[in-house]
Amino acid sequence: MSWELFWLLVEASGLTILYSAVSIVVGFFVSAAVCAGVLSSNRPISAAARLFVSFFRGTPLLIQLLLIYYLLPQIGLNVPSAVAAVLGLSLCTAAYQAEILRGGFQSVPRGLIEAADMCGLSAFATFRRIRLPIAVRLTLPALTSEAIMILKSSSLISVVGVVELTTMAKDLASSTYQPLPIFAAAGFVYLVINLVVAGFGQLAERAARRGHA
Amino acid sequence: MNRRALINWSLALATGVVLGTALPSAASADVLETVKKAGVLKVGTETEFAPFDFIDKGKHVGLNVDLFEEIGKEMGVKIEWVTLPWDGVLPGLETGKFDIVAGPATITKKRLERYKFSPPIAEATVAILKKKGDASIMKPEDIAGKPTGAGKATAQLAQLQEFVKKLPKQGEVKEYVGFNEAYADLAAGRIAGVANSLPNIAFVAQTSPVFEVVQPTFGVKTYFGFPENAAPEYASLNDAVAAAMAKIKADGRMGKIQKKWFGVEFDTPAEVKDPAI
Amino acid sequence: MNALSSIFGYLHGDDGWNILSGLANTIILWLVGSVLGAALGFFIAVARRYGPKPVDWLLKAHVEVIRGTPFLVQAYLLYFGGPYLCLALGDGSVCLTLEPFHAGLLGLTVYGSAYYSELFRAGFEAIPRGHIEAATTVGFTRWQTLRRIILPEMTMLVLPSMVNMTILLLKETAVLSIISVKELKFQVDIIGNRDYAFVESFTILALVYWALVEICGAVGRAAEARLSRYRFAHS
């Protein structure tokens, strides 16, 4: 396999990184809201949030992307490829992140919440200052895993016309008939990107642990 | 069943209905007029189908690119390519994301029920691809008793299955998600041959030092055409494309393009109304 | 056009049977793959925590490589690359030529184990040091501490992520169609590719996967409800 082909893979990985990064960030904010909704005592809100998680976790991402790309134009919203890709990826990851966060929230020691309550913190302040930071700290490894998962799942956005790393690898494999070295090289590029992500995850874990002690 | 499960199920069902009913209903204005007004013909295709559409040095090239360039000239419009995996190509045609599909696809009876097809652009008749230097397969009948493969649910697979059935000894016919995976398994040694249309495997053998084509072709004669939207508002566009292709064929440009990508010219009929399969 | 009736048209006869056999294969791959994957992942997490440093490094490298590369690439290299990996033996050589189903199951187990092991690791880390020290002080052995303190305490934290991961593994089984494993997506896609009935095939896929995920989620919720009793008893 030539350097020229490898370089094409590296170039295509730029889109993989871009779309995943944007979607993970957008997805995190959506997931915090969804998670709050799921845990809410308001029944309609809780039901709606649960339905969101159920749908975006339950159906294949490929089909969610097709729905966004092909169905929204039918009701007058013409979504360009880039928007469809970000929307699909971030809604899907939001469902998974919301479930991860829920696990974290439910593991926040009751005593801490009661203590915050006694100190006169408002419900929102308790959420923002106590529950959210602890939940995020407890679930950092799972959140890092989810970020890596989305980086890899982003290969599906080719279905709305974005040629990212996996699609480029498939294209090159099918025109050169040397699939093994090309797929191995693509795997290597993914590995490098994900090691960086995992590294950041560990830094964050370490920082959080320091704050905890 | 509790209430939440019930809600989920009804939503699931609703999704199915919406998916099923909303997708095929596209705009109703005459598409040829829209295309001419915009000066752009949008063509959807995949890029894993050499030599028709593929990526060479990072650029989309192939027979389809050259041919649509000429079609665009005849119609006085520019060509805009939309490249997607094959999974997304036909839903895109149905919802009007693009005006025609380059593909191409083997013209079959079942597919004609759902789509229209352009005039044929090449023969799709099937031959065997083997590992280079495999002296045990010198003609198609030599695959008797050996494992072979093809892309699943393709017209080529159906032809291979028919052919193997008539051989004195039947080997296993394996199905792959696509032809590229079948080639990879041929290289890995699990199967002895891959059946695919001659234009495709001739290109494979020409590009890769690992494979070789077994002549002659077998089975019934079939043709490749471009899938088109069958809705009435597309009729004038489909006619215009057919007229352009007829002209390109008559003045020898089609033959030249075929020669460039297949190494040979094909004699194709003006239209396939009643395909053999 | 009536897609719903044409969907039902595909649910009987030969197509129906093929879809059913695909569903059976998907469920077997999913269940066996995630159980074996979780077991292997647990051992990886325990070995990394209690084993010597070099074992920790080696397993960490394994986890990072498996987590860092797409399952598609792993399955592809295992199935299509395996036959090139040969061991020269006395009389001839043995190559890693696996059948699609076996390659799929092996790949899924190893892939899942890397992710599950990280979830267990997160669980271990979340246990307050004081609890473990207290257990040691009262004379618990390492195994007793693991079984009586660490596992019950981390379950509530880890369970939702475990359900997540198990659902992700279900989705990953669809990738195996690239190595010709005749699972659900392989069989349903045949309808799409043969008759160009993509709307029907996608709808069937969405509904069936959704149903499977809901079942998995329900099992997870039931387990949580059962285990949350422990939580209040202990805190």
Image: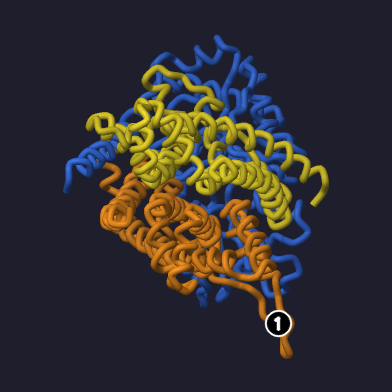
Residue at image position (35%, 35%) is A52
Q: Is residue B244 above or below residue C109?
A: above
Label the blue chain with its letter. Answer: B
Residue at image position (50%, 56%) is C129
Residue type beneath disc 1: Ser
In the rendered picture of this protein, how many numbered marks are placed on residues?
1
The residue under label 1 is C93
Where's residue B152, x and y in %?
Answer: 49, 55
Q: Is residue C113 left or right of residue A118?
A: right
Q: Is residue C175 above or below residue A61?
A: below
Residue B257: image quadrant is top right
How many residues crowd around disc 1 within 10 Å: few (fewer than 14), some, or many (20 or more)?
Answer: few
Which color scheme does this rendered protein use? by chain
The hue of chain C in the figure is: orange
Where's residue B54, x and y in %?
Answer: 67, 40
Seen from the viewer's position, the closer of residues B204 and A181 is A181
Q: Chain of mark 1?
A: C
Where's residue A15, x and y in %?
Answer: 65, 34
Residue at image position (70%, 47%) is A192
Label the yellow chain with its letter. Answer: A
Q: Is residue C195 visible?
A: no
- SS at mark 1 in the image: strand
Q: Is residue C127 left or right of residue C205?
A: right
Residue B38: image quadrant is top right
